[in-house]
């Protein structure tokens, strides 16, 4: 199996276009890079921090879905359900994990506290991490994965008030350094009476064709780098043409009217 040194990975990120001093959100499948000299996730994390430099800020998802499943959200102990990079990042000294009990993100760098600040119950929409990420035009790195699971699309759907999703409030208990408190989180859920699946193939192809998106292969994966505003621009354009452009209905399910 291919092995990669941390320095080689750092050079690869820089050649791909990662800019130091900028925020970057990374969704990853670390084994796609082969077998780094120490461990895949540790060297990926270290190489990304090297590429961003001390003025850059790295974010990674650390979703737990705690309240949706009736579980306590422990800010320090609840493991990420979406890969190891977020789990590693949240445990780095100085890193911050957001208080969202379903869709937390971890961040390390000078912009982490500001972008991760939780000012309301919504996970997507006005005043959320994803809105600030777009405003900052953060870099988006898809490491060995495609656009299928990128939650930034749910931010676009929420702002467009798509008719196939609805807000749902979840309540539960959060624990932070031994202190427990009751909290609430509002998720922009799919309407479960409608049988559909997320379908980001069309928007993904449009983003990949944009000069603002760069693709490169390394080891066993294809890696994509773009910006938050590029993702949003193409998603909004697709929804303007087709209100159901980000999903695929099953054949027996009638389409719903677009929100007015």
Image (cartoon, rainbow, N blue to C red):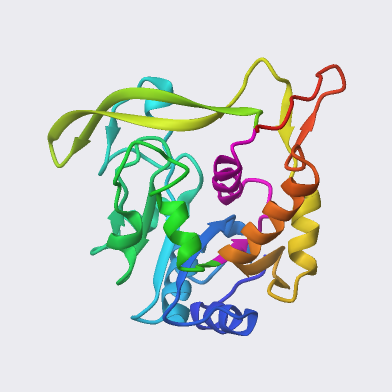
* Residue 79, horizontal then vertical, whole percent: 37, 40
Quadrant of the rendering where the C terminus is positioned: top right
Q: Examine the image and state in which quarter residue 54 appears.
A: bottom left
- Residue in the foreground of this view, choosing between 26 and 251: 251
* Residue 259, horizontal then vertical, whole percent: 65, 32
Task: Write the residue at 51% across / 81% down.
Answer: 19
Residue 194 within the magenta-colored segment of the rendering: no
Residue 155 within the magenta-colored segment of the rendering: yes
Q: Examine the image and state in which quarter residue 244 appears.
A: top right
- Side (left or right) of 32 relative to 39: right
Quadrant of the rendering where the N terminus is positioned: bottom right
Q: Which residues are magenta?
A: 140-162
Q: Examine the image and state in which quarter residue 9 appears.
A: bottom right
Q: Image height check: is 135 above or below 55?
A: above
Task: Write the residue at 73% across / 55% down.
Answer: 237
Task: Write the residue at 57% across / 57% down.
Answer: 28
* Residue 142, horizontal then vertical, whole percent: 61, 61
Q: Image height check: is 260 above or below 18?
A: above
Q: How many marks?
A: 0
* Residue 72 in sight: yes
């Amino acid at each position: 199996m291919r092995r990669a040194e941390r320095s080689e990975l750092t050079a690869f990120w820089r050649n791909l276009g990662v800019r130091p001093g900028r925020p970057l959100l990374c969704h990853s499948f670390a084994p796609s890079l082969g077998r780094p000299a120490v461990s895949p996730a540790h060297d990926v994390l270290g190489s990304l921090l090297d590429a961003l430099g001390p003025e850059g800020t790295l974010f990674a998802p650390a979703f737990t879905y705690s309240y949706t499943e009736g579980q306590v959200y422990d800010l320090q102990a609840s493991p990420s359900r979406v890969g190891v990079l977020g789990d590693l990042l949240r445990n780095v000294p100085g890193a911050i994990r957001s208080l969202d009990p379903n869709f937390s993100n971890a961040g390390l760098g000078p912009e982490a506290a500001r972008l991760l600040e939780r000012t309301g119950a919504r996970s997507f929409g006005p005043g959320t991490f994803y809105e600030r990420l777009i405003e900052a035009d953060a870099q988006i790195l898809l490491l060995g994965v495609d656009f299928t699971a990128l939650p930034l699309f749910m931010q676009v759907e929420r702002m467009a008030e798509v008719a196939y999703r609805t807000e749902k409030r979840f309540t539960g208990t959060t624990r932070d350094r031994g202190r427990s408190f009751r909290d609430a989180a509002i998720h922009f859920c799919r309407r479960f009476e409608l049988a559909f699946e997320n379908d980001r193939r069309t928007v993904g192809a449009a983003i990949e064709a944009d000069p603002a998106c760069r693709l490169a292969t390394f080891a066993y994966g294809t890696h994509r780098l773009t910006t938050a505003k590029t993702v949003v621009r193409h998603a909004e354009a697709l929804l303007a043409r087709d209100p159901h452009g980000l999903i695929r209905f099953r054949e027996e399910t009638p389409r719903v009217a677009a929100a007015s």
